Amino acid sequence: MEDFEGAWVVERRIVHEDQPDAQFRGSARFLPDGDGLLYEEKGLMKIEGLRPVSAQRSYLWREGEDGVIEVLFEDGRAFHRIDPENPEDTHWCDPDTYEVRYRFGQWPDWIATWTVSGPRKAYKMVSTYRRPVPGID
């Protein structure tokens, strides 16, 4: 997990089936917190037809068995797992289903793709992470 520690640039595209598309650009930091890593993300969300808004979120990353990363919500509830042998997982948030696939083949750049489906939500969200370039980012 320590390979994630530090600063990242995040670029995200969210494509909705029945709503305007959105884009997010910001920064993420993985900070040691005594039990693993604290993930903090901040940036600007742009939704077609609306004024840009500030957005932020946080998660807890914990080391599980066999190299699996347990991703938790800020309050400690389970969210999903990242298994290096099979970097795909599903989170059910009644009544919607969240499916994620991580790609680490171009490390240190990496991608998280979420497909969300259900009666309330239908979108695909692709987040690309890369290390910041000093003087540019």
Image (cartoon, rainbow, N blue to C red):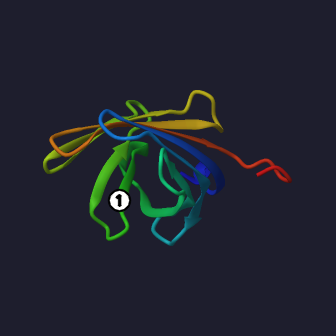
Label 1 neighbour load within 10 Å: few <14, some 14-19, many 20+: some
Residue 125: x and y, percent? 42, 39
Looking at this view, is 129 or 5 the one in front? 129
User: In the image, is residue 131 above or below residue 112?
Assistant: below
User: In the image, is residue 76 above or below residue 17?
Assistant: below
Q: Is residue 122 left or right of residue 109?
A: left
User: In the image, is residue 60 above or below residue 90?
Assistant: below
Looking at this view, is 52 or 129 the one in front? 52
Q: How many marks?
A: 1
Residue 131: x and y, percent? 70, 46
The residue furthest right is 135
Residue 4: x and y, percent? 59, 51
Name which residue type carries label 1.
Leu
Q: Residue at x 54, y 57 (%)?
A: 52
Residue 75: x and y, percent? 32, 71
Q: Residue at x 19, y 44 (%)?
A: 96
Q: Is residue 64 left or right of residue 26?
A: left
Looking at this view, is 58 or 47 the one in front? 47
Q: Residue at x 58, y 65 (%)?
A: 31
Looking at this view, is 53 or 136 the one in front? 53
Q: Which residue is mark 1?
A: 72
Residue 104, quarter of the rendered image: top right
The residue furthest front is 49
User: In the image, is residue 103 above or below residue 129?
Assistant: above
Q: Residue at x 29, y 36 (%)?
A: 18
